[in-house]
Structure formats: C-alpha cells, structure tokens
Image (tube, rainbow, N blue to C red):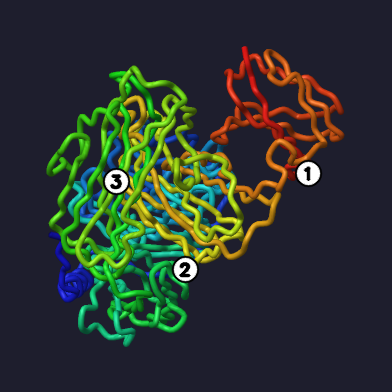
Amino acid sequence: MKKILPFLVLLLLLSKAVSAQTPYGVYQVNFAPEEFVETNFVSLPDDRYSDSIQIGFPFVFFGQSYNSLLISSNGYVRFDISYANSFSDFSVTQSLPDDNAPLSSIFLSWFDLIPISQPLISYATLGNAPNRIFVVNYNDVPYFGCTGTVYKGQLKLYEGSNNIEMHITDKPFCEVNSGWTNFAIEGIQNANGTEAYHVPGRNNNGVWQTSNDAWKFDPDTISAEACFMTGRVIADFNGNCIVDGNDYALPGQVVIRDGNQVFTSTNQAGVYSFEADTGVYQIGFNGLTANLPFGTVNCPQNATFNLNLSEAGTIADSLDFFIFPDSTCADPQIHISPMGPFRRCAGNDNHQAIFVTNHGLLPIENYSVSLTLPDSLYLYNTEPAFSSQEGNTYTWNFNDTLVFGEITAIHLYDSLSCFTTDGTFKCIAATVSSSGDCNTNNNISEICQIINGSYDPNHIQLLTTPPTPQYVYTMEVEGTEQWYTYRIQFQNTGTAPAQTVVVTDILPSFFDYSTAELLGASHECMLVNTGDGTLKFVHYFINLPDSSENFAESIGTVIFKVKTNQVLLPGQEIANLASIVFDVNEPVITNNAIFEVPLPNGINTINPRMDIYPNPADRTLTVSSEFSNATLQITDLSGRIVKVETINNIQQTIETANISAGVYLVELIYNNVKVATQKLVVSH
C-alpha cells in the first residue's frame, strides 16, 4: 500500500535544517574578481589534478593549516596533495557532505569541464603579507559534451582571515545537454566528508546558472539561513481551492521555477520544494496555465506564484496548486510497449513492458492485469511475478492504491520459437480491470511486433490503430484524428552506465502543447512541459547499464500522447523527431516519425513526375525525374530509411545491390517538400 506522508512532517524537517549553526558562514558579496597579469598557467588534460602548487602563506581550512594545494580541471581545488597528477572526479552524482566526493576541497563550480586548449587555468599569489590573496582563474574553459559553452570563474583564498570567495563571471545553461552537464556544486567539504557548506540551491539539487555572481565562506560565523519555497499539488474535487472532502496531494507532478530553468517534481506525499537565497522568484505548474490533460489549475491565478523573499531563512510553505478535474472518477488505462528487437530462437531474449496509469484523479483501490500470449511465445520471467496462470493467460493482482502521477510497470521477458517466420507479426494483448472504472475504453492494449524486423537503438515511432496495432516510423492517416501516441526508445550503447538521460521532443505546431500526457515510462522520469512545445523527459540517477553489460536493461522507453489542434489535408504530412542525451555526451538525434494523408489516387500515383525502372529491381535502379538537386530516399514499409541519394541529373542510376529483397517506398524530396512517391520491389 502506498502511503501519503503528512505535510507537517516535511515542514518540521525543513525548519530544523535551516536553523542549524555552522562554523562557516555563507554570504553573498559584491562581484569583484581580481585583475592581474597572468603568468603562472596550469596545463591540464581532461579530468586531472595538477602538481602540488604553493599557496604562498599558511591557509587554515576546517581547522587544518595548509601551504599547498592541487588544482582540478573540473572547477575546484584540493588540499590533499597525495592526489597530485592523478584522476580528478568529474561525476557530480551526490550532494555534500559525502565521503565519496573529493575531500578537503573547495568547489568553485564542480562539474565536468575539459580544458582542451591551453592555457585556460592560471594562479597567482597577490599582495603583501599579512594581507595576501591566492587566486585561481578558470578562463573560458569549455563544458564537456556541450560544444561552444564555456565557464569563467575565480577562486580567492585570503591570508589571515582564511576567508574563501568564489566569483563566477559566467556559468551558462547548456542547451545541448540539459542533464548532467548543468548539475554542479558550489561549496566546501572537510577532510572526511562529514561536514560541508554550500551556496543555497547549488548542492546538486537542481540545475542552475549564473553570471557576475560572488559568495564568501567565512569561518567561525553563523551562516545566513537559506530560503525554502514549498507546496503541494492538490486534486481539488469541488474546485474551491481548499483541501477538504476527498481532496489529496498528487505525486509525480512537475513544478518549474524561473522560466523553466529549474524544475522539480512532487514526492510520494505530493510535496515539492525549492531551496534558494533571498531574491525574486516565479513558480509555475509545469509551464502550463490551463487545458491540462486531466483538469484545470483553479488556483493560483494563471497557475503561477510570484515571490519576493527579502529575508534570509524565509519559508514560503503554502504554495499549493489546486487542480479541478475534468471528471471525478478512477480511470485505469493500460499500454504495452516493445523494449527492444523481436528475435526468434532460444538465446534471443525479448523484452516488453506493460504500463498501468490512473487517468482519473480518484485513487484506484485494487486492480488486476491480464496478459494473453500466442502459443509460439514462451514467457520465462516477469517483474513483478504474476499471481496466477491459466494456459497462455497470466494475471497480476495489485492490492495497493494507484493515484494520478504513478505508473505501475510489469516487465516481460520471453523467447520466440525458431519455427516462426521472419517478417511476420506476433501480437500480445493486455487488459486492466478495477471496480469503479468510469471509462473502460482504455482498458485494453495490444501490440504487434515484426519478427526480426529492422532495429535502431534510439528512435521515435507512432502507434497505429487496429486491426494490427504496432509502432511504426511512417503511417497514413485520414487527417481528422484527434490524438496521436508516440513512443521514444533510448539505449545506452556506450561503455559505462549512464547516470542521466534527457529525452527532448519539440512538438510541431500541429499539436496542442498543453495536452501532452505521459502514458508510460520504463524508468522513473519527469515530463517537463515548458508550454511552448518543448517536452523534456528527464531521468536523473537512472544508472542505465551499457548494452555490452546488459542488453535488455540498457534500453529505456517513454510513451506519451498529444492532441491535435487542426486537421490535415490530402498530401500533407507531420514529421516529429527527438534528441536523446546520455550524461554529457553529444545528443543522439532520432529519425522523423511521420504521419501523412495520402492523395485520393493512392500511393502509386501521388505524383507522376518521377519514374523508376526496372521495377522489380536487382542491382541497380534508374530514376527519371524533372527535378535536379533533389534528394531521393528509399524506406522500408515500416518507415525505416535504407538509402539516401542526391539526385543531380534528370536521369540517374542508383545502386540497390546492398538493399535486401522486399517492398520499399521511393520518395523524391525537393526544397524540403516530398514531390513524388513510388513503390519499389527489390528482387535479387
């Protein structure tokens, strides 16, 4: 049974946390980096400490006196010189204090930097005794995995007072990698990882950016208390903006601060919180103001709180969003999804996942899931284990409570008989049932997979309608459909586990952005809807293994649906792609998932301005067209692109020897417009 924790408990914990006295005070100060002629440069490779560097005077840090330190390529210094010229950790996966993080360290901005050109890091001891200052400069050091984005900051250590100042000229947001690269720590930690202090909101508890910003760490003082902004997302069944009756707080709802740059989600108790310094802030409900997939934000006005926190230690603790539902009911819905390729014969393990969500705002009390498999498919494991089996039908009985924002996932692991035929379909169906269900139209899900079909580890697909529901790359539609369902698959094909995965989909204007709804996810994630068409599926601390270590578990998926705001006319098409970022690597761009309305005469006569022969083709194909400087694209019937050629002549020969025998579509694209399409049969 899932438990809803009392909101009061969280407030008591917050109050205790911000009232503690510390040996270091943390204060914001005037931005004033030292200007000097740089002569002492440190040439560092990626993820490396420098040799031992003399400070020039004794510096006391957490009660210990030091005369030398190491400079890291990743934005911090360390006083333990036994690490000289060794590996410097770039992986910011924890908050301070933590004994797995670098010890005896001052983190100007600890995150993954790469000083690819030299010199970019320098140091100096300025002034005269007893008022000298040791300075470390990071001069436009590039972010790792975020081309064109650089960091600039200065660390100052003061003789005598032992004060520490951090002056950041520019720490921009990485638009390419909205995951790991944007996480950083600005703070200090002692020699055993038991005591640490940080700038409010900069302890790996959310993405942050800043410019012309400065903070001081002053020993033996009391720190200014951090400010907290906290509240709940409430299912408000009578729309009165008061918690009463059956109202309850919703888990898993995304709340955004300051123009979509900082975001979090409500916990199991339906509570969210932000930590920050004094200042002016704006908090919104997932970038939306109305027309939510399940209801409307009645309070606050425009689904936004505007705050001016002028006093340190302020706790704004009643920032509640009240959601008035479209209907008052429990509505279990089910979706089944492939989780990788579909192969036959023992040893080729297959993986699917069933997702159950509550589309209504009334909690579901007790529900069952049933799955029916074809005879040729052997189910050898499920997570969780099934409750009962009768022939090819398996049943799971759940006795917990399912509320909006939660997802129940059932993972299926199976193998397919060797006697099945490549290129044919196998379908599996699942149903969900519970008492009090107000809408049984979404209780059944069926998915068909092509045996040994084409496979791309990172892709986006569309769900077709019965009689053969499957995820495809291209499909024909009537143009009057209201909802479309997308599935985005990602797979870690690297050489180490991925800690952060961010999937971004910028929707075409054809859709009503506010209606995007998460239907299923293989791993815990946040759907961040910025309200302008950008959807971000954010997976923090996912620990996704690489495919060589565990192929089945290296795959993740998200499923969402979105509503249209217009109809399509014959000949029109809508293309949608996604980008996938694993940790700080360059984004992986998926294919385009395309749906289109065919012209009345059918696909063979969409446009007569291209001729292809011979058809069927063997090793070569001749294309005759009135267009030059066009692009010719050959796709299989699932929409997978198998060949792309530039057409420079009115008549041109294309090699088809490397294309497998089968039926394909040949498309001619001119000025980004599809001007002709023909069927092609390849026969070797």
Nearest to the observer: residue 259 or residue 127: 259
User: Marks 1 and 3: which is nearer the front?
Assistant: 3
Instruction: State left or right for residue 576 relative to residue 344.
Output: right
The mark that comes first in sequence, 1 or 2, is: 2
**For residue 671, which numbered disc appears in the image?**
1
Q: Count of labels shown?
A: 3
Residue placed under numbered mark 3 in the picture: 430
Three-letter amino acid code at the position of disc 1 = Asn
Picture coordinates of residue 41, whole percent (x, y): 51, 40
Q: Residue, x 21% and y 39% (percent of image)? A: 393
Q: Quick check: can you spot residue 33?
A: no
Which amino acid type is shown beneath numbered disc 2? Gly
Secondary structure at badge 1 equals loop
Q: Is residue 473 above or below residue 140?
A: above
Where is residue 424? Give x, y as percent: 44, 27
Mark 3 Cα within 10 Å, few/some/many (few <14, many 20+)?
Answer: many
* Residue at the disc numbered 2: 287
Residue 572 can be seen, yes or no: yes
SS class of the residue under badge 3?
Answer: strand
